[in-house]
């Protein structure tokens, strides 16, 4: 699954989120870290900003979402007519990998 497009920006979003958390919060919310970092607030707000962010990679991003949802849910439910939803779902997917990597390194 291609999830490298703008990964650095999504990583920065996660890093900024983590700067606001302390160790006690992290221990209490470790199992829901991905949810808190990527599902309780939008990565991008507004369709114009989302379109700008997607640029000419919109179809690559949609394909990533389609593959992810098909693999995890057996069907695709995303609304691809909403650029804001597309960007935020993509950030959620890439964020899942970022959080997993963070926890693996942290637990070593």
Image (cartoon, grey):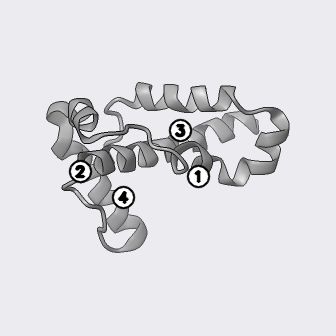
Residue under numbered circle 1: 35
- Whichever of callouts 4 and 1 sits on the residue coming sooner in the sequence is 1
User: Pointer 3: residues within 10 angstroms few (<14), some, or many (20+)?
Assistant: some
- The residue that disc 4 covers is 68
Residue tagged 2: 62
Residue 56 x/y as whole percent: 14, 33
Nearer the viewer's eye, disc 2 or disc 3?
2
Q: From this view, report whether residue 7 is shown above or below residue 72.
A: above
Q: For the residue carrying disc 1, how many other residues have a C-alpha within 10 Å: few (<14), some (14-19), or many (20+)?
A: some
Q: CA distance from mark 4 to mark 2?
A: 10 Å
**Which numbered mark, 4 or 1, is in the foreground of this view?**
1
Per the model, the C-alpha gap separating discs 3 and 4 is 15 Å
**Residue at screen point 77% across, 41% down:** 26
Q: SS at mark 1?
A: helix
Q: Are marks 3 and 4 in contact (CB under 8 Å)?
A: no
**How far apart, in angstroms, are the residues tagged by discs 2 and 3?**
19 Å
Q: Earlier in the sequence, mark 3 or mark 4?
A: 4
Q: CA distance from mark 2 to mark 1?
A: 21 Å
Question: Which quadrant: the C terminus?
Answer: top right
Could you say where residue 32 lies in the image, as x and y percent from the top left? 66, 53
Q: Depth-wise, is mark 4 or mark 2 nearer the camera?
A: 2
């Amino acid at each position: 699954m291609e999830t490298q497009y703008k990964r650095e920006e999504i990583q920065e979003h996660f890093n900024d989120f983590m700067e606001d958390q302390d160790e006690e919060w992290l221990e209490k919310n470790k199992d829901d870290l991905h949810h808190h970092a990527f599902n309780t607030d939008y990565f991008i707000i507004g369709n114009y900003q989302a379109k700008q962010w997607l640029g000419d990679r919109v179809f690559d991003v949609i394909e990533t979402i389609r593959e992810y949802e098909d693999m995890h849910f057996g069907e695709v439910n995303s609304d691809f007519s909403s650029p804001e939803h597309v960007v935020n779902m993509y950030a959620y997917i890439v964020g899942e990998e970022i959080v997993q990597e963070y926890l693996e390194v942290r637990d070593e």
